[in-house]
Each structure stands twice: as structure tokens, then as C-alpha cells.
Amino acid sequence: MTSLRRVSAAGTVTLLRQTFRVGKRHRGLYLRLVIDTGRGKLTAYLNGRVVKRWPYQLLNERPTPEPAAAGGPRRHSARR
């Protein structure tokens, strides 16, 4: 997932309700933030160069549903 975010006066960016510190030297600039879910990394780019990289794990708003009961998914019997 890729997103553009502006660095705050405090030197932070917010993505998906999470705040990451980039540094005050970048305040006011727009960064491209890329989430690599396979590697679990969030990378910030400025003009195509890596500015900073953080470990990242997606947070679910709702808990994942419970797996189906033993015996597999329920199937409706065919009407004849």
C-alpha cells in the first residue's frame, strides 16, 4: 500500500491512525509511505530515496472471525 503524507511541525507522519517519527528536518515536506506487508516494513521515501524504515504490523479494528466448527463449512441440503 502506498500513501502520501505531509510531515508535521513535530516531525511526524500519521498513517492508519498510527504515528511515526521522521525527524524535524523533513517538516512540511510530503513523503511517500509504502507498507510492505510481506516483510512487515513501513518505508518513507523523499524524492525516491529512503528516509526512514520501521517495522510494521497491520492492526485490525475488529477481531478476526472464529474458524468454522470442526467438520468443515456448513452446506445446505439440496431441495428436490
Image (cartoon, grey):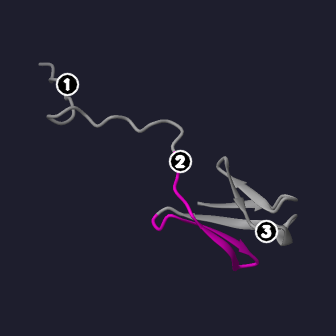
For badge 2, the amino acid type reads Leu
In the rendered image, the quadrant that contains the C terminus is top left
In screen coordinates, is 2 left or right of 4? left
* Secondary structure state at the residue bearing disc 3: loop
On the image, numbered disc 1 is attached to which residue? 76
Query: Does the magenta run of residues contain 50?
Result: yes
In the image, is residue 34 above or below residue 17? Answer: below
For disc 3, the neighbor class at 10 Å (few under 14, some 14 to 19, many from 20) is: some
Q: What's the residue at 77%, 59% (across, down)?
A: 12
Report, in whole angstroms, how far the alpha carbon at label 1 lies from the one at label 3: 58 Å
For disc 1, the neighbor class at 10 Å (few under 14, some 14 to 19, many from 20) is: few
Q: What's the residue at 83%, 70% (across, down)?
A: 26
* Secondary structure state at the residue bearing disc 1: loop
Q: What's the residue at 49%, 36% (across, down)?
A: 62
Identify the disc placed on residue 59.
Answer: 2
Q: Quadrant of residue 23?
A: bottom right
Identify the disc placed on residue 48.
Answer: none
On the image, numbered disc 3 is attached to which residue? 23
Report, in whole angstroms, how far the alpha carbon at label 2 lies from the one at label 1: 35 Å
User: Which dot, 2 or 3, sits closer to the camera?
Assistant: 3
Residue 63 horizontal/vertical position (percent): 45, 37
- Of all residues, the one furthest to the left in this rendering is 80
Q: Earlier in the sequence, mark 2 or mark 3?
A: 3
Which range is magenta? Answer: 38-59
